[in-house]
Image (cartoon, grey):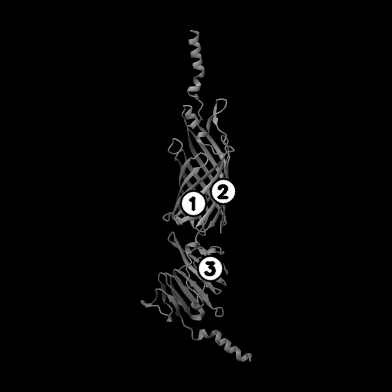
Amino acid sequence: MLKAVLPIAALLIYSPLLWSQSIISYFEGEVTVKRNSREIEADFGLDLEEGDLVLTGPSALAILELDHGRTLKMRENSSVTLEDLSPRTSVELKSGSVFAKVDRLLNGDFNVRTESVVAGVRGTQFFMAYGQMIDAKADLWLCVNEGRVEVSIPETGDSVLVNEGEGIIIPGSIQLTPPEAYDWTEDLNWNTNPSSGDVRDETDLSGAYSDLLDQDYF
Amino acid sequence: MKIKISLVLLLFLIQPLFGDHHNEGDSPSDTVGFSPAFAVSSILDFGDFDLHTFIAAEFNSESPHVYEFQALLYYRVFRNLKAGVFYRLQMGQRHDDDWIRNDDGSWGWDDASSRLENIAGADLTPRFLLSFMPGKSWVLKTKVRYSYSFYNRNQKVLFRPELTWFLMKNRKPVWNFSAAYGLYFPLNFSDSLIYEHGPYLTISRHIGDSLILSLFGEYRTRYWSSSAEYIAAGGDYHVHEERYRAGLNLIWRTRI
C-alpha cells in the first residue's frame, strides 16, 4: 500500500516542477511587462519568461506565480526583473517593494537581489523594499514573516541572518545593521492569495523611519 | 517768627507723605546669577495627540527657587504643525510688581517663594525638515506660545526659533543637538518690547526608543520694569538681570 502511495504523493508534491510555468496570477491597476524591448500589457494568466521586466504603476499591484512554487507580490511603483526562473530562482528588485514567498515543500534557491544586496530565502516569506533616498543612496528594508533570510552584500562579503519576526535596514544599501523587531512591519499584509482576502498592502514605509518632526524636548 | 519756623519744620516733616517715597538706591540693581535646574518629563503619544507633562525645579541664589508642573496637550494638525493647549502650576516666580516698600520703609522684592500661580495658554509649533542639509536630519521649528497668568493677568508670547541636528544610527536618532533663541514679548505689562530673551542649547541622548536624557544650558537676560508701587511712589527704574541656567531633563516617551 505504502509503495503505491509514495509515488503518487511525490508526483503531487513535485508536480509543479513537471509542468511549471510563470504567470501573472493577479493584478490591479497598470501593470506592464517589458520583454525584448516590447511592452506587453498585463493580463490574468500572462506567461512570464526569463529576462522579463515587470512594472507596476501608481496604486497598482501584481502577483506573480513563478516556477518552482515562488510567489512575488509587487506593490505599487515597483519593478522586478526575472533573471533566473530555474530552481535557482533569482529576481532583481529594481525599484519599489515586493513580498516574496516560497512554497514550503519546494525549496531550492531563491534570491531576491538589488544592485548591491542579495536576500537568500531560507524560509518561506519575506518583504523587501527600497526606502528613503538619503545622500543620493537608497536605503533597503527587509523583514521576514516566516522562516529565515540570509542578507548579504557581495561586494564586502558581509552577511547576516534575519529571523522570523525580525527586520533589517540597510542604510544606503551598503551597510548591514543588526536585525530587530520593527513595529511598522506589523501592518504589512502578507496575503498573496486573492481568494482568501485582500492582497493589497498599503503600509506607509515612511513609518519605518523615525519621524524627526515628532520629536519634542520641551 | 516762631510760628513761621514751626510751620516750615512741620512741612518738612510731613513732606514725605505727599512727595516721592524713594531715594536713589531704592530701585533694584542689575544682577548676574547662575541657576541649576532639573526636570522630569513624560510624553504620552496617542498618535496625532501627545500629552506632555513635566515637573521642574530651578534653584536660584538671589531669588526664590521656582517649581513648575505643566501639562500640555498637543494635536498634530498636519505633518508640519502641532497645536496645543497647556496648564501650568508654578511657585516662586518673581514679577515686575514684586518690588515693594517694606514696613520699615525700605524697598525690596516681595517674597514669592511660596506663591502659587495658575497659568494657561496655547502653543503653535511649526516644524520643517531641512532635507537639503546632509543626512536629512536637520529640523527647524519655531515655538509660538501665548500664556495667561491667573495671578496677575499678565499675558505674554514666547517666540522661539530652534535648529536641531539629529545624529542618526541605523536611521534612528541617537543624539540631538539643538540651538534656540527665546524672545518673550509682554502683552500687557512691562515697558520693554521684549522683557526676556536669550539663547538656549540642548544636547540630548536617546537611550532606546523611550528614554531621552537632555542637558541644557541657557543665558537669559531679563529686563525689570518699574513696579506699580514704585511708580506710585513717583519712581522709575529699568534694570536687567542676567541668568545662566544649566540643567538636566529626563524624558520618558510612551506610545499608546
Placement of A193 over or under A175, stated as above or below? below
- Amino acid tagged 2: Phe
Extreme-front residue of the structure: B3
Disc 2 target residue: B54
Q: Chain of mark 3?
A: A
- Amino acid tagged 1: Gly
- Amino acid tagged 3: Cys
Disc 1 packing (10 Å; few <14; some 14–19; many ≥20): many
Total labels drawn: 3
- Given residues A70 and A192, the one toward you in this image is A192
Q: Are marks 2 and 3 on the same chain?
A: no
Q: Chain of mark 1?
A: B
Quarter of the image where one finds residue A44: bottom left
Disc 3 target residue: A143
Disc sitting over residue B84 in the figure: 1
Label 1 sits on a secondary structure element that is strand
Marks 2, 1: nearer the viewer: 1
Label 3 sits on a secondary structure element that is strand
Q: Chain of mark 2?
A: B
Marks 3, 1: nearer the viewer: 1
Residue A98 rendering spot, x and y as whole percentages: 47, 71
Label 2 sits on a secondary structure element that is strand
**Disc 2 and disc 3: Cα gap in Å?**
37 Å
Disc 2 packing (10 Å; few <14; some 14–19; many ≥20): some
